[in-house]
Image (spheres, grey):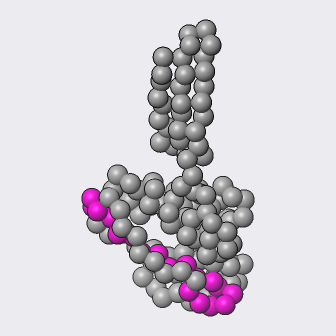
Amino acid sequence: MGREISEIIREDLIFTGLFMYIDKTSYIEDQQKAFNPQNWTPLGIEAVVKGTVSGDRNLTVAINLYDTMEAKPVLSKQYRAEKDLLRQLAHNIADDIYQSLTGAPGVFRTRIALSLMMKAARVFTLWIGTDRGQERQGRRAD
C-alpha cells in the first residue's frame, strides 16, 4: 500500500509541472536512516519526503517533509483512513506537500463534473470524476 500511496502522490506533484522525482536508485538514505541534508543537496534536491504506512484495513500514514537547503523539517503529519479511501488519502497528502512548498492550496482532491445531453434520445448524463479520470461516476436521467 505504501508504494501505491507514494505513486499517487508522485503523479499528483509531477502533474503540476513544478516538481520532479528522482529515480529510487539515486536515493542515498533509506527509510530507516535519519534525514541528512548533505545526502541530498549534492544531487540538487531541494525537498525530501519520507513516510511510513501501517495497518491493513485502517491505514495510518506518517510523513515528514524536509527542506534540504535549510536543513529542517517543513511538515510532519499523520493521516488516518480506511483502505478503500486510499486514493483520497494520497491526494490529501499531496495537497499538504504542495501547500507547504508553494504556499498555495493543492487541488488534488478536486472533482470535475461534466454534463452531456443527447438531443435525439433526450438523455442527460452527468459524469463526475477526478482530473485524470479516476473514480468516474455516471448518472443518467431520461
Q: Is residue 69 magenta?
A: yes
* Residue 142 in view of the camera: yes
Q: Toward which corner of the image does residue 83 lie, by quadrant?
A: bottom left
The location of residue 52, given as percent across then percent down, is: 40, 73
The majority secondary structure of the magenta stretch comes to strand
Query: Which image quadrant for residue 106?
Result: bottom right
Residue 7 percent coordinates (x, y): 51, 58
Task: Tell which of 22 and 12 is nearer to you.
Answer: 12
Q: Say if 57 sits above or below 75 in the image.
A: above
Task: Relative to 61, say whether 124 is above or below.
Answer: above
- Which range is magenta? 56-73
Q: Residue at image x 57%, y 56%?
A: 108
**Quarter of the rendering occupied by the N terminus:** bottom left
Q: Does the segment drawn in magenta span residue 83?
A: no
Q: Is residue 65 left or right of residue 57?
A: right
Find residue 72 and report its horizontal and vertical position in percent.
59, 90
Rendered view: 4 above or below 113: below
Residue 106 shown left or right of residue 7 in the figure: right
User: Which is more toward the observer, 65 or 38?
Assistant: 65
Residue sitting at 42 percent across and 82 percent down?
32
**Frontmost residue, 83 versus 28:** 83
Q: Can you give x and y, in whole percent of width and height, for residue 100 in the image? A: 61, 75
Residue displayed at 72% across by 64% down:
18
Circle count: 0
